[in-house]
Image (cartoon, rainbow, N blue to C red):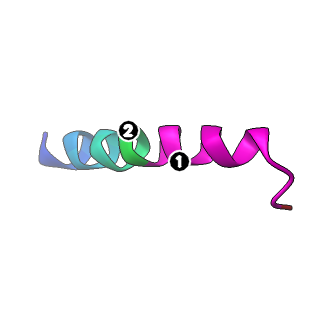
Amino acid sequence: MSEPTHTNHLIHETSPYLLQHAHNPVD
C-alpha cells in the first residue's frame, strides 16, 4: 500500500514540472 502512494507522490511532483517544460522546447 505504501508503494503506490509513494509513486503517486512522485508523479504529482513531476506532472507539473514536466508540463511546464513540455510547453518549452527543452528537448
Span shown in magenta: 14-26
Q: Is residue 18 left or right of residue 15?
A: right
Give me the C-alpha separation between circle 1 and circle 2. 9 Å
Closer to viewer: mark 1 or mark 2: 1
Query: In which quadrant of the rendered image does the N terminus lie?
Result: top left
* Quarter of the image where one finds residue 8: top left
Q: Which mark is residue 26?
A: none
Pointer 1 or 2: first along the chain: 2
Report the magenta stretch's main SS.
helix
Pick the residue in front: 24 or 27.
Answer: 24
- Residue underneath mark 2: 12
Amino acid type, label 2:
His
Amino acid type at circle 1 is: Tyr
- Image point (63%, 38%), residue name: 19
Q: Quadrant of the C terminus?
A: bottom right
Percent of width and height locating residue 17: 53, 48
Decide: few, some or many residues near mark 2? Use Cα within 10 Å; few <14, some 14-19, many ≥20: few
Q: Give the residue at x 61% y 46%.
A: 18
- Compared to residue 11, the image places residue 27 above or below, namely below
- Picture residue at 26% right of the left edge, 40% below the top: 4
Q: Which residue is mark 1?
A: 17
> Does the magenta-highlighted stretch encompass residue 18?
yes
